[in-house]
Amino acid sequence: VPISNIRNFCIIAHIDHGKSTLVDKLLQMTGTVQQREMKEQFLDNMDLERERGITIKLQAARMRYMFGNEAYCLNLIDTPGHVDFSYEVSRSLAACEGALLVVDASQGVEAQTLANVYLALENNLEIITVLNKIDLPGAEPDRVVKEIEEIVGLDCSNAMLCSAKMGIGIIEILNAIVERIPPPNDTAESPLRALIFDSYYDPYRGVIVYFRVIDGTLKKGDRIHFMASEKDYTADEIGVLSPNQLQVEELYSGEVGYLSASIRSVADARVGDTITHYGRRAENLLPGYEEATPMVFCGLFPVDADQYPELRDALEKLQLNDAALKFEPETSSAMGFGFRCGFLGLLHMEIVQERLEREYNLNLITTAPSVVYRVNCVDGDTVECSNPSILPEPGRRRSIEEPFVKIDMLTPKDYIGSLMELAQDRRGEFKEIKFISEIRASISYELPLSEMVGDFFDQLKSRSKGYASMEYTFIGYKESDLVKLDIQINGECVEPLATIVHKDKAYAVGRALTLRLKELIPRHMFKVPIQKDMTNKRDLWADGDIGTYSRRC
Ligand code: GDP
Ligand code: MG
């Protein structure tokens, strides 16, 4: 089809608001996947995905749709739903001209959804609001429309009403995609620039890269250059996703596709990188490229010391597929040999821990998660420190800075008090409260990331009976009055138990920890595992559609 008949879009939705159901209907209605095929083939795909686990964050599907007398090519690009992966969400949005905002009309808009809507607006996407589940007796599309208009200032006068489950409103949505989302710019003659919005490691074919051609034309067999990683490869295979991989000879500006080039690690073809031609290079990378910065760290130790080499192998394998995962060896007299690992956030940490235990059969002890502190020393040095044991001596320290986040909580009004108390307990600084409708409010705080890495999310859910949602963004480093809390057993410091805490909390934290230890130590004879609390995980798992994260309960 001509470029004027291409539409690239993604779907923004909170978990359970009906994204998968809607995608199924769009694929069926456009004949991309037949109903019968849907069950068989799709289940197969899902199994594969499950095997590969949650590392395949985003994929795409190409649909053919007849509108009037013309054929249109609709490319759906999937986005992960969780804030830990907001960078990846932002890159998949940057690959689109429009977005469907799907909101459950019986619930309302949620915090993570909003975060992604703001990203979409920053990327100048045309947003089509879809109110789903209008078949439910409790659906209140008018209230939900008001909420969206109130909080994002988005004009929802042409919001679409839909029941993905009953197949109501699907054609109207397809028509709106064609009519309201602009086509890509035609720059097929410019030097090649393709934006990577996803990649995964396939043990047989090497890394498979998903990209949107922004400028130029890519042909099969072209010599290509990755501008950020500065690696060169040959595009042995290129194709489109329909939604299975289908080889083609050429991809032009505006098109979405995949390539395989015997790339050995996803670190060579990172999300956000720009692909250009080896010979005719583009001048500049596409905007928005960022290195992955781990924000949360923890120590991983095998319960059985013999498993240390297996743990190292497993981490190396996972890293092939996950450019954001960082690790380095760590030794401790109490825990033996292990690794200090860095993650994008809590969900990312849990995913990796879970995969190590389930897929690699490792039995692990995990130390409490911590963040990276910045220590300004009297001699002018700045030491970055994710591990309390390498904290410079008190005499050398001038000040300690810690990472802060801004959190936005959306909640029914009954739980406002309890959630504000929670944030205040965690050294939160109140910023703003806003009623987005008569019954729901949005509350913002700034607080230290270290106060969030514990059970903050679980607390939010239990205090609001599951009704509140939240998202957070990193806002930068700030000085805090922090001290190192050492724990001694039998008069000896146990390094892995040391933590960095706020001065005002040191006593309470120390007391709680020693009380726990007192209970644990006789039973465990001085080997003190730090227990990890993995309750209420379900909401933390991101979810995807065209074969992405498997849903966990
Ligand atoms: P996702 O998490 O956003 O992908 O949501 P799903 O598509 O998995 O849907 C979550 C639940 O809502 C499932 O039980 C669906 O059957 C149900 N659901 C989805 N769309 C509708 C709808 O239009 N009406 C009703 N009543 N239920 C729906
Ligand atoms: Mg889903």
Image (cartoon, helix red, strand yellow):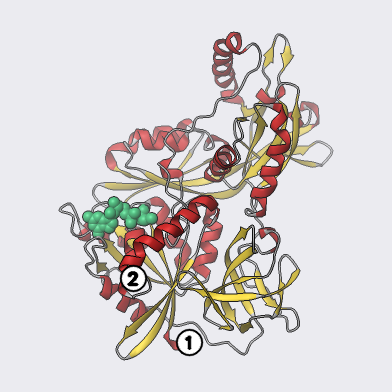
Indicate the position of residue 380 as horizontal and vertical percent values: 82, 41
Front position in the image: 171 or 387? 171
Indicate the position of residue 239 as horizontal and vertical percent values: 55, 76
In the picture of the structure, the residue carrying the numbered disc 1 is 3
Residue at 23% x, 66% y: name it.
167
Neighbor class of circle 1 (other Cα within 10 Å; few <14, some 14-19, many 20+) is some
Front position in the image: 236 or 475? 236
Q: Quadrant of ligand 1?
A: bottom left
Compared with 387, 446 (above or below) is: below
Residue at 74% x, 79% y: name it.
278
Q: Amino acid at mark 1?
A: Ile
* Marks 2 & 1, CB-CB < 8 Å contact: no
Front position in the image: 511 or 277? 277
SS label for mark 1: helix
Indicate the position of residue 151 as horizontal and vertical percent values: 35, 58
In the picture of the structure, the residue carrying the numbered disc 2 is 34
Residue at 57% x, 78% y: name it.
214
Q: Which mark is residue 217?
A: none
Indicate the position of residue 58 as horizontal and vertical percent values: 50, 61
